[in-house]
Every structure is written in C-alpha cells, then in structure tokens.
Image: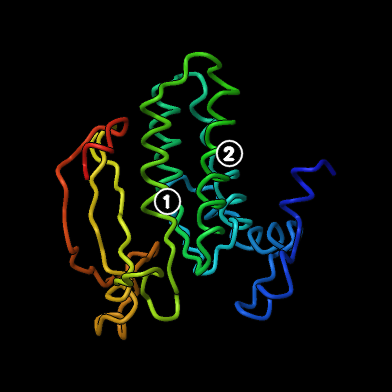
Amino acid sequence: MNEAEQIEEQLVISRKRVADHGEVYTPKAIVNAMLDLVAQETERIDSRFLEPACGTGNFLAEVLQRKLEVVKSRYSKSQSDYERYAILAISSIYGIDILEDNVMRCRDRLLDLFKDHYQSLFKQDIKEDCLKSAKFILERNIEWGDALTLMTVGSKPKPIIFSEWSAVNGTMLKRRDFSFKNLLQHEGMRDLPLFSDLGEDVFIPSPLKEYPLVHFLKVTDAD
C-alpha cells in the first residue's frame, strides 16, 4: 500500500474528532462490499447517490470510479461523448459533511479522480472547460452542512440546497435547485417515493429555482 492509499485508508484522524463528531471512516473493503449490493445502480451513469456524512469521500469516490469505468468502456473512442457522460456521472454524486476540511478534501479527491481518468484517455487534449464544469458541479453537490439539521455550517447557516443536473438534447444540461429539507419532509413523500424504476407514481417536488439550458462544458454560465 503506497502513501496515498494509506492516507485514504486511515480510519481515524484524531480522538477529538471521534469524540466531537463520531468521525470514523469506512474501510475500502467494506465500502466495496456495500456498493456491490447495489452494483447495478453504481454502473448507471446517471443514477444519483447522496452520502449524508461523506467524510473525505470513501463511498463517493468508489461510486464515481465505477461510473467512470462504465463511461470509459462505452465512450472512450469519442472525446466529446466521453466528456458529456463523464460530466453526467460526476453530476450524480452528492455529499454532506459537518467538517469543512472533509468537504474540501472530498471535492478535491473526486475532481482528481475525474481528471486522472480524463487525462489517461486524452493526454494533452483535455479541455479546461470540462475540468471547470466538473469543479463547479462538485462545489454545489458536496455541501458543508449538517444532515441532521438540514442546514449549512458556518457563520450564517442556511437551508442546504442541492442542484439537480439533467441531460437534455445530448449536449445540454438543465439545472434546478431544490431545498434538501423540502425533499425529505414534504407531505407528498408520506405516500409517494422520490424515485422509481418500476413505473409507479412518484413525488415530484417543486424547485426553488430553474436555470436556462446550458452546454455541459459551460455550466459555470448557469449561476
């Protein structure tokens, strides 16, 4: 195991963090065993995953790794197709953590993983706009917040808001912002689920804000 792997496999940062926040990271072997139980979903490029106590991203990194392997196997012969589906994959990853350093490390870790896959295929032909789009999405999908209070953490707490990114007409993305609290606590969810692959009726929440369609390489324009 190299130094980077040892750091990622470290289960406890400090006793104080364990005492204050109950922070103990999940070992990679357990992460993989748990994700194997939903392997079909981890291989769906647009299947959304939320980790409410994401730490530095042990679960989310493995989900993204699996998704990017699928993107590679299907679309590596076309750079534009690869970029489009890689952005869709990273846009499906969501996380919350109460510790700011964990949030920053998680974002960086996922972006590095995205960049490593991208560069391994296209070397010097990578587009900065693609990396900027991935970074922009991660800054909105990985939140510094408290999943119990449903609020952000910091000097001015506010409700956690997540952006939904949906592919439209191939190269375009539709962004809609939703309150995490409304997603979890809406009365409609008492009877209807948020998602279904079986064709049942589902609860369709109302967005706080909708944005114009934007090219997947220009998502920073939709802010």
Residue 75: where, in percent of width, then height?
A: 48, 27
Q: Tell whether 17 sits left or right of 83.
A: right
Res. 83 image quadrant: top left
Q: Is residue 221 above or below residue 12?
A: above
Q: Which residue is at the front of the view, 125 or 43? A: 125
What is the number of the mark on residue 142?
A: none
Three-letter code for the amino acid on which mark 1 is drawn: Ser
Rendered residue at 56%/51% (across/down) = 105
Q: Is residue 73 visible?
A: no
What is the number of the mark on residue 92?
A: 1
Q: Quadrant of the C terminus?
A: top left
Rendered residue at 32%/30% (across/down) = 217
Q: Quadrant of the N terminus?
A: top right
User: SS class of the residue under badge 1?
Assistant: loop
Three-letter code for the amino acid on which mark 2 is drawn: Leu
The colour scheme applied to this rendered structure is: rainbow
